[in-house]
Image (spheres, grey):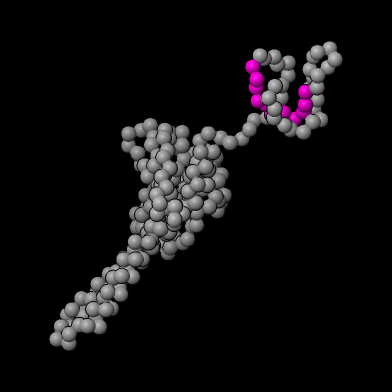
Amino acid sequence: MAVLPQRWPWSIRDSKDLPTELQRYLADTEINALGGQVHEAVMLEPVVTTTVGVIGCLYFMSRVPPNLPQLGDFLVITMLVFLGRLGFLYWEWNRNLIFITGKRIIQVRGIITRRVEMMPLSKLTDMSYIRTPFGSVLGYGTFRVESAGQDQALSRLSPIPDPDDSYRYVQNLLFGRAITDVRLVDVTTHKKVNVRWNGRVRNMSSGDSTIEEDGPPDAKWW
């Protein structure tokens, strides 16, 4: 387990390119995964708070009366607390990861004690996609997921980078996106159907139809 922070930008990765500790949790059928660190917007509050706190401490330190050295020491300690909090939250951000495979959603978090939470996609009953005005400006979104079980280890995934493409990625995993090629042989129907095949239909003079195999793939209503 890596101790020092390591950046894992949000992207689709091969299982061999995932963090070493995460590879221990993957099944052999989980080949690719989308994920990494959540959006850097999670660090916005710590950065703003630390900046304002440090500037405030420096301002008051320059105006501490000579007869109150304890106040100056207090301001120095306060400034160090702000900086330490920023460093801790940055470390935590780098160590908290979310990955979405073809089978489940995995969240790994914690610094000293690592906690792995997962939700199989097969048990996912509902998924909400929330994009606040602030999230639209910064480029992140929130996924709220519900499962069939009562005890949900994962219920809120936020802030998710590249939310539009990430949402489509999850929907493709849930519902599939491939179009199945179909070859019709001796099929009769009174309804219009939409099919894709590797040939074309040619009407014979006798009124029958035959399928030719040399046509380009196409899809039409018949």
| Magenta stretch: includes residue 197 | yes
Span highlighted in magenta in the image: 191-201
Q: Nearer the viewer, residue 71 or 140?
A: 140
| Furthest residue in direction bottom, as rendered | 66
Q: Where does residue 68 sit, x and y in percent of width and height?
A: 15, 83
Can residue 40 be seen here? The reply is yes
Q: Residue at point 38% right, 36% down?
A: 146
Instruction: Name the image quarter holding the C terminus.
Output: top right
Q: Nearer the viewer, residue 33 or 189?
A: 189
| Furthest residue in direction right, as rendered | 205
| Magenta stretch: includes residue 206 | no
Q: Where does residue 215 sit, x and y in percent of width and height?
A: 79, 31
In the depicted structure, whether residue 116 falls above or below residue 213 = below
Q: Residue at point 80% right, 27% down?
A: 213
- Tell whether 69 sits left or right of 171: left
| Furthest residue in direction left, as rendered | 67
Q: Where does residue 189 sit, x and y in percent of width and height?
A: 67, 14
> How many numbered badges does the structure rendering display?
0
